Image: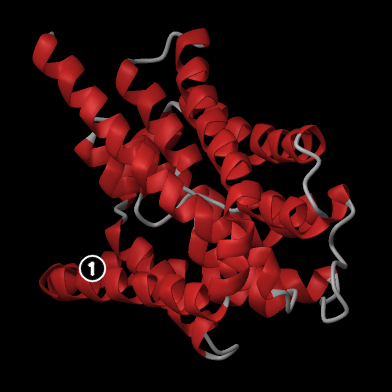
Amino acid sequence: MSAALLPLGLAFLMLVVGLRLTLRDLASAFAQPRALLAGLAVQVVLLPLTALALACLLALPADLAVGLLIIAAAPGGITSNYIALAAGADLALSIAMTLTTNLAAFLTVPAVMALSGVAVAGEAALPLFRISLAMFAVTAVPLALGLALRRWAPVAMQRAAPGFETAAKGVFAAIVLATFIENRDAIVSHALSAGPAALALNLAALGYGLAAGRLLALPTAQGRAIAIEAGMQNIALALFVSTVLLGRGDLALVGLVYAVVMNITALAVIAAARKATSAA
């Protein structure tokens, strides 16, 4: 996907995320911040550390190691709220985590890259402040715009919501498909090397979320929401960082594999949650 179309597509996806949010739902999540802070610790701290550990443990090549770290540093994905709803998780907490991590991504992603020493990977890499500025433009600004539209034009946005949601699914599919086509040969050749790392990171994210819920004695729905949010990363944003900001299509390989893995495990989480509900 061209350097112009990918940022536009990502900005649209962030706009749709903003249109899903209500201040009332967010207020309920922020009013009891223990679960939210636990989720942010998992997503912002534990996942990047785990990616670094996996890169060393699996002796990943530099391109796969950097790609895995970008995935770990990415905020919650746009589909995580759907999965949370389907799995009977705490939707307000899921939305609050999505909002917080995506709004902060223009700071957290460059920070993780800098601390790990990969911020200047590739000759086309941008300085950190320019990465932050570019990410702010395509994530925080459209997300805030979506929130404002939902707040000030609720009737119109409610009517338009089905169309926006359908378009968002198409845009996300186009981003992944275009990147896959552009890198198909490299993906096939690296499938065996990238697959185990992507699966291990995803399972770690789910495990951390569930463990945090148990350790803090949170309601089951909140622990499940943390696990889903940590596991469903914003692949579109990771592709944007890899291919546009860093100018490295090879860094997107792990992200494309992770996109497949996270959706498979998400279906497993939904099935397990529904089985547990029916057995109760």
Q: Position of residue 263 (x, y in %)?
A: 36, 47
Compare residues 187 and 258 and report the one nearer the observer: 187
Q: Is residue 188 above or below residue 40?
A: below
Q: Is residue 193 above or below residue 164?
A: above
Q: Position of residue 12 (x, y in %)?
A: 40, 77
Coloring basis for residues: secondary structure
Q: Residue visible at 85% across and 48% down? A: 116
Q: Position of residue 267 (x, y in %)?
A: 28, 39
Give the crowd class for mark 1: few <14, some 14-19, many >=20 residues within 10 Å. some
Q: Is residue 40 above or below residue 6?
A: above
Q: Residue visible at 76% across and 55% down? A: 66
Q: Secondary structure at mark 1?
A: helix
Q: Is residue 203 visible?
A: yes
Q: How many marks?
A: 1
Q: Residue visible at 48% across and 84% down? A: 8
Q: Would residue 178 be found to the left or right of residue 220 on screen?
A: right
Q: Residue visible at 43% across and 45% down? A: 262
Compare residues 20 and 117 and report the one nearer the observer: 117
Quarter holding the C terminus is top left
Compare residues 215 and 247 and report the one nearer the observer: 247
Q: Is residue 157 visible?
A: no
- Amino acid carrying label 1: it is Glu
Reading the image, the residue beneath label 1 is: 165
Q: Would residue 29 be found to the left or right of residue 160 on screen?
A: right
Q: Position of residue 256 (x, y in %)?
A: 52, 60
Q: Quadrant location of residue 110?
A: bottom right
